[in-house]
Amino acid sequence: MMSDKKTVRFIITRQDNPNSDPYQEEFELEYRPNMNVISALMAIQRNPVDVKGNKIAPVSWDMNCLEEVCGACSMVINGKPRQSCTALVDQLEQPIRLEPMRTFPVVRDLQVDRSRMFDSLKKVKAWIPIDGTYDLGPGPRMPEPKRQWAYELSKCMTCGVCLEACPNVNSKSDFIGPAAFNQVRLFNAHPTGAMNKAERLNAFMEDGGMQGCGNSQNCVQSCPKGIPITTSIAAVNRDATFQSFKNFFGSDQI
Ligand code: SF4
Ligand code: FES
């Protein structure tokens, strides 16, 4: 025990493989100023010993940018899904509880597989197709206010926090989750992206699309990037409804 020095306590949910049962381990680390959850996890990695002094397997987690841009380090910290790279120990109640996001399959410990998010981006064609076989020259310019608006939507880092917060995203539902709506709104608003607008909207009329949202509003409250997700969901639903009329009557009649 490090009783003389100031310490930080962690309770971490561990899981050895995707099919094994989770268990908890407790850690006590020496406090350092400006410590965040990742630096604490790194300290455990350097010295994988639990609070009782037992040597344990190092804890696994994902990280990349360390500045809340990539989304890889997302986990549930004291019950709240968020990025561990920006979670400061000084601002957290102790013991600090770390768990994996349960919306996604656990790979190991705090590491999850976010493939379902990338699969839904594929499903709704959240990209702009570009013929790369010849030089297309500069793309169309967006008016500055629209560019700024689009920039806010483009901040999504596919972190998965809004899916973890949404009660309608779970293993019993095929709802693609809030983030994909926002991406479709972004790409549909782009001058080149608008050419595939109908295709993207049609994907939302399938199972798991616009019917899946229960309007709990949890997503917009949880997004670390402050993305207006519920406004994006409403906008995409409106456009998809309009698209369904177009599909029914033929576009030239509307
Ligand atoms: S919309 Fe926000 S919470 Fe959802 S994946 Fe994107 S950045 Fe994360
Ligand atoms: S490591 Fe990229 S968001 Fe935390």
Image (tube, grey):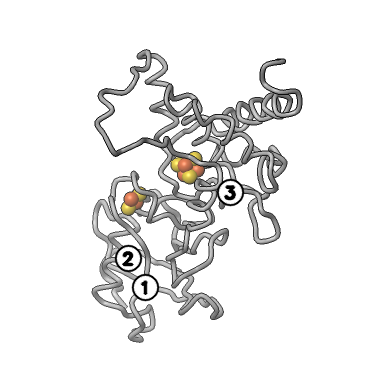
Name the mark on residue 41.
2
Name the mark on residue 7.
none
For residue 126, above or below residue 54: above
x 34%, y 19%: residue? 140
Judge by depth and name the residue closer to the eye, 245 or 253: 253
SS at badge 3: helix
x 39%, y 35%: residue? 155
For disc 1, the marked residue is 59
SS at badge 2: helix
- Determine the CA span between mark 2 and mark 1: 7 Å
User: Quarter of the image containing the C terminus?
Assistant: top right
* Three-letter code, disc 1: Val
Among numbered discs 1 and 3, the one appearing first in the sequence:
1
Q: Is mark 2 within 8 Å of ligand 2?
A: no
x 56%, y 79%: residue? 21
Among numbered discs 2 and 3, the one appearing first in the sequence:
2
* Three-letter code, disc 3: Ala
SS at badge 1: loop
From the viewer's perspective, is 7 left or right of 172? left
Q: Dot 1 surroundings within 10 Å: few (below 14), some, or many (20 or more)?
A: many
Asked whether the residues under the numbered discs 2 and 3 touch, taking CB atoms below 8 Å apart as contact, a structural biologist would say: no
Q: Dot 2 surroundings within 10 Å: few (below 14), some, or many (20 or more)?
A: many
The single residue placed furthest to the front in the displayed view is 133
- Determine the CA span between mark 2 and mark 3: 24 Å
- Where in the figure is residue 90, as x and y percent of width and height? 35, 51
Among the 4 quarters of the image, the one containing residue 243: top right
Q: Dot 3 surroundings within 10 Å: few (below 14), some, or many (20 or more)?
A: many
- Where in the figure is residue 183, as x and y percent of width and height? 49, 36
For disc 3, the marked residue is 165
Asked whether the residues under the numbered discs 1 and 3 touch, taking CB atoms below 8 Å apart as contact, a structural biologist would say: no
Judge by depth and name the residue closer to the eye, 91 or 250: 250
